[in-house]
Amino acid sequence: MQRRDFLRGILAAGTVAITHPATAQTKLLNLKDYIRFRFCRPSVHLRSDIYTLMNHDPNHPIIASYRSGVAAMKALPDSNPTSWAYQANIHGTSLPFAQWPAGAPFATCEHGSDYFLSWHRIYLYFFEKIVRKHSGNNNFALPYWNYSKAGQAALPLPFRSPTGAGNALYNGTRANSVNAGNPLAAGTVNIATALSKASLLGGGQFQSSLEGTPHGAVHVAIGGNMGAFSTAGRDPIFWLHHCNIDRLWEKWLSLGNGHANPIGDAAWMAETAEFVDENGNFVTMVNSDILDTAAQLKYQYEDPRECIPLLVANAHLSDLIRRISIKAKLKYILRKDWKIDLAGKATRLDLSESDQRGEVTAFLRAGKLRDIAKSNRIMLRFGGLRLRVPMNGYFEAYLTVGPKETFAASKPVFIGNINTFGADAESQASMMQSPKMQEKKDHEMGVSTSIDVTDVLLKQVRGKGDTLLAVTLNPVSGVEKDEQGVNREAEPVFGEVALDVLPIEAK
Ligand code: C2O
């Protein structure tokens, strides 16, 4: 009885007000759309966990369709916009500009920018449509690889067996250990750090933290094609990896705590990207049209799944969003052109040598630090990393903080991973080839990782005396029981290591 009244009430109005947790926007949907998108109907494609599909049926129709769709794309000439090579070239390419097909939006992948998540979301959206068409399975939706779930860290079996060209999902360029089924290491697939961040944009916040780990860490652990921008899209696992990254964006939003998309940021909302649709036509999409995956893009994830709308408007949500500014108010350069020797186990940088003017020592006074931390976050930035070739691994970063007198006995604290994906010369050259990317930004060359060290500093800086600081980088390969280890030929150099002071703005 009550239920009927409820429905009649909505029908009389013809619309229903929905506040979507992903956008914090209240909108009026007509009842038809409400029922179509919100009750887990098949009109919304469901992206599933590949392990769930595999355990159910090793040749599940979704897996079989992905394999046949990829095979069909690989059979097309490279100049066809829906071909395997063309799609990969959109991400990055080593093809000289003069050889690009007319109008090709090649080498436009967004990394280290505000648009990492949105660009890759749209990239996947059209790729999924292309596979759907070429596989002939209208129910096809991209599966995701949730490597962070217990027992799922090994490359899914259909991608490594059978080996050889007969299996369109196999790729022989990957690290041997990965194709042998060794699980990715726990540090590679850690999602807790990224998911704990408060805002989406900003240095060291959710998007950039996620881009480093697990995103970049998984790329370099798999290695081969996956290890560089210019070739990553050629490995069929790339698309399941990014499907998971896109899912983690939804996951982060679903955690509440004021997590929200940057709908108040006009530039972000108006950002567009260009791709190719399933019919080979150029298409442009704008960020404001990709925020609600079910209603706007007609797909959802197995987890998190939001079929039932939140009918109660949460008007305060957007006021709670605190955004960390991207521009540093103050910065202390600790070191320029820091070369890392991969022959040793770890490399330590002692600040006491670089801080000749005593600026950082002055900054690290307990009272001053506490004051600064009230309205700022302090980031340790490992900027402009360049590699000769991919190093097939990443760095664990440790910070030693302690009073001058007892510094030698101070213990290093793990502060996070440093991303190396895309730092190699080949990836950097790929980015520089695209006229669109060239005009878009002054390229800060290399790859930068910012790690929020505010809490560590607050905890360790005490008393009135001088505090010293040192960072230690430990190169690790991202796969368990890996015999290859990191590639010593990579010759890493960090352009700049610095402490940045980033103001917190209430939005
Ligand atoms: Cu644009 Cu995972 O790379």
Image: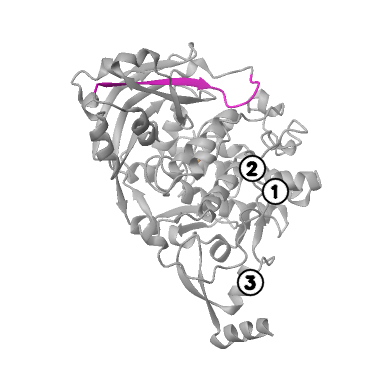
Relative to 54, is 107 on the left or the right?
Answer: left
Q: Secondary structure at mark 3?
A: helix
- What is the distance, in whole Å, between disc 1 and disc 2 at their CAs? 22 Å
Task: Please give the label number shown on residue 232.
Answer: none
Q: Which residue is mark 2?
A: 146
- Please state if 285 lies on the left or on the right of 441 as rendered: right
Closer to us: 320 or 87:
320
State if disc 2 and disc 3 touch (CB < 8 Å). Answer: no
Horizontal and vertical percent position of residue 40: 67, 65
> Alpha-carbon neighbours of circle 3 within 10 Å: few (<14), some, or many (≥20)?
some
Q: Amino acid at mark 3?
A: Arg
User: In the rendering, which numbered label is found on residue 36?
Assistant: 3
**Figure check: 94 above or below 205:** above
Badge number at residue 69: 1
Q: Is mark 1 within 8 Å of ligand 1?
A: no
The quadrant of the picture occupied by the N terminus is bottom right
Q: Secondary structure at mark 2?
A: loop
Give the mark nearest the N terminus, 3 or 2.
Answer: 3
Name the residue rendered at 62%, 86% in the picture: 8
Magenta span of residues: 465-482
Distance from the alpha carbon under mark 3 to that under mark 1:
28 Å
